[in-house]
Image (spheres, rainbow, N blue to C red):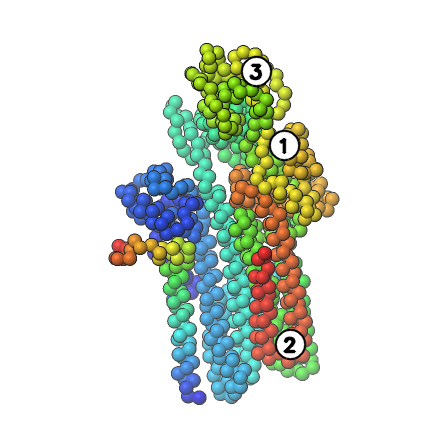
Amino acid sequence: MNVLAYLIPVSLILGGIGLVGFIYTLRSRQYDDPDGDSRRILDAQWDDQPKP
Amino acid sequence: MACPGCIALPLDGEGPQARADDILLSLPDIHCQVCIRTAEQALTARDDVAAARVNLTLKRAYVTPQGDVSDDALIETLAGAGILAQPLDPSVLRSTETARAGQALLMRLAVAGFAAMNVMLLSVAVWSGATDATRDLFHWISAAIALPAVTFAGQPFFMGAWRALSAQRLSMDVPIALAIILALGTSLWETALSGHHAYFDAALTLCFFLLAGRYLEFRTRAAARSAAEELTALEVPRATRIIGGVPVDGPVAELSIDDLVLVRAGGRVPVDGIVTDGHAELDRSLLTGETIPVAAGPGTAVAAGEVVISGPLTIRATAVGRETSLHRLADLVAVAEAGRANYTPLADRAAALYAPGVHILAALAFVGWLIWAGDMRVALNIAAAVLIITCPCALGLAVPAVTTAASGALFRKGVLIKNATALERLAAVDTVVFDKTGTLTEGAPEVMNWNTLGREAQSVALALADASTHPLSKAIARLSGDRAALTAITEVPGFGTQALWRGKSVRIGRAGWAGPEEAGGGLMTWLDLGAGAPLAITFTDSLRAGAVEAVAALKNAGLHVEILSGDREGAVADVALAAGIDTMRANCLPEDKVDHIAALHAEGRTVLMVGDGLNDTGALAAADVSLSPATALDAARVASDMVLLGQSLAVLPDAVQCARAARRRISENFQIATVYNIVAVPLAVIGLATPLIAALAMSSSSITVSLNALRGTRR
């Protein structure tokens, strides 16, 4: 059962990474314009260099 | 560390959107990446624009200006790029506050979901046979996750319960908060005594499901509100004041009494006042329902909300802002609304039965076990199990899920639900009352007796009508035919149009100028060919698209349909006949309309009022549920629960069907939840409910009702 000493922290950390990632997406306004973002990726305008 | 709720909120200035000095434009027609790029490039190419970002979801552009730039210039730039834009009044839009509340709720949902998953993982190990020190360790870890998570994620419920209790009543939040707190409390106690059963997973799952319901509810309301706000923000109220003989544009709010206000043709009168200069015809249909324009000249009293058809008029203001007759109609709305406030939503009615029942049941189980077994620990555990199993998921999750699905379906059909309970009230409707002008009819006239005129008269009428913007002229000009060759065409505002034709003076216009002094009723104009008696051209108000189908479908569905109009008897009878409506009332003042709705109530009817004018606002507010077209005056849209975004009325019967389906689905969900409780509650009361059974009963009932809700309105 010693494996629990690793597995429990590992599962908590993995879940925590997911939570932190979600908070990051929320904070950087990635849910403000879902329609627009899914369309912008089809646009070739900034394919060669990133938007300044 | 800052408050966890604030973590979710974006920092000020981060991201390009919603700055204080941003200019907002509505771009109703954009739909793809090319539109986005064209709009952004056109806007940023201007020197006076620092940045521009298009939001496709909201169909808006946020423009950060560099220096001074007006809305009109930006709209012109976009029009040059082939994109239709309209100015939005940012002060009316409160989307930023709404977005913040939504993000905070989403954050709580995420935390509850994360914690519930982890604790559930540990609980599965316990259920499948972990014992002794391992079980205690798992319980302690669960406690360490659950306590902070519930403290943060459960705040909406705790606060709601506190508000309800301090107002000395019971709400849905009270049993929820009590169940969560009791479950956590007994579980902690059990864990400390290294007991078998802990309910940490149940408390968190409960939180998660109910927060999901809250979030759905919030989303629906926010979407409806932002769409309604957008309709309002599209109308930036402006007026032209004459200062020292020079016309100056400015907001309506800056007008004061005795100002001279210039209203051009097609403009809406912003104040109550007296005409000092100019002749024009006024369209009062939004105020009174009359379709026939009224003549106005110096000395005529005009009221705010009237539309000047042929202009221009100079008006000396006698009342502005809240003092105008337009705003006094708002008092009528306030009085009428008081009658509607006593509607209790289904969910609240169920909660009123449910909340005391659950508390009594849990208390009885607690007292019973305390007496029977004499053990406080056992009794508390059983009370907690009862509270968790009776969790109001059907109320907290199923009702918002049904409402969200139904309002989404209706929104796609072009009906915007503004009020949270409007859908339920719509389902109960048995009488539909229509206003005539602008609701059943387009408000745009059509020529009736064209073929009786004769070819020469037709060609002259067409040529004269081409030169004018008067609605009746436009109705004539829409017809096809040869135009006579006229010279010296002049429009005489308030009277008509005149010209020279084969050396004779010809006129088209109102009675007394182009026709006889006294003319009969009805919507008509006169054509004077310079020789012989003037000819009358009569008009009818054409029916709105889908009106006939809508009325027929509503009648088929067993609803009683009526017309309630402020117009003359004859005009109303014509429309009633054309639309297939048997019951009508004409010559109604706004007060009469409210009284008639009240009379229908007294007969025990549930009324849907459909109207667009200021004279309807009282009736809209008095009816059980109300709908107005998007073209209606702001005041009418505010007073109604639903807004028809498209042109056609044909969606109305669909909306009623959809509302009835949603209501049926909600009661099915209550039944499903009741069956679960009938099975599971006895188990809990006799002490057989382990945390595993509690988790199973709760999750499966939540999932069943949600699936049933989604099945709901997809037809």
Q: What residue is at 68 percent from the left and 71 percent from the top?
A: B678
Q: What residue is at 52 percent from the left and 87 percent from the top?
A: B131
Residue under label 3, please give it: B534
Residue under label 2, please give it: B684
Quadrant for the N terminus of chain B in the image: bottom left
Q: Given the image, what chain letter belongs to the residue carrying mark 3?
A: B
| Apparent side of residue A2 relative to residue B574 in the rendered image (left or right) | left
Residue B495 vertical placement versus B186 (above, below): above
Element class at badge 2: helix
Q: Given the image, what chain letter belongs to the residue carrying mark 1?
A: B
Q: What residue is at 31 percent from the left and 47 percent from the top?
A: B41
Disc 1 residue type? Answer: Gly
Query: How far is mark 1 from mark 2, CA to CA?
Result: 63 Å
Q: Which of marks 2 and 3 is nearer the N terminus?
A: 3
Q: Which of marks 1 and 2 is nearer the N terminus?
A: 1
Residue B189 vertical placement versus B603 (above, below): below
Q: How crowded is mark 1: few (under 14 residues within 10 Å), some or many (20 or more)?
A: many
Q: Position of residue B553 (x, y in %)?
A: 65, 46
Element class at badge 3: loop
Q: How many labels does the image show?
A: 3
Q: How crowded is mark 2: few (under 14 residues within 10 Å), some or many (20 or more)?
A: many
Q: What residue is at 39 percent from the left and 75 percent from the top?
A: A13
Q: Position of residue B257 (x, y in %)?
A: 48, 28
Q: Given the image, what chain letter belongs to the residue carrying mark 2?
A: B
Using the rendered image of the protein, determine whether residue B227 is visible from the camera's viewpoint. Answer: yes
Disc 3 residue type? Answer: Pro
Mark 3 or mark 1, which is nearer to you? 3
Residue under label 1, please give it: B566
Q: Where is residue B499 in the image (x, y as percent from the top left)?
A: 46, 16
**Circles 1, 2 touching at the beta carbon (< 8 Å):** no
In the image as oriented, which residue stretches furthest toward the right?
A: B603
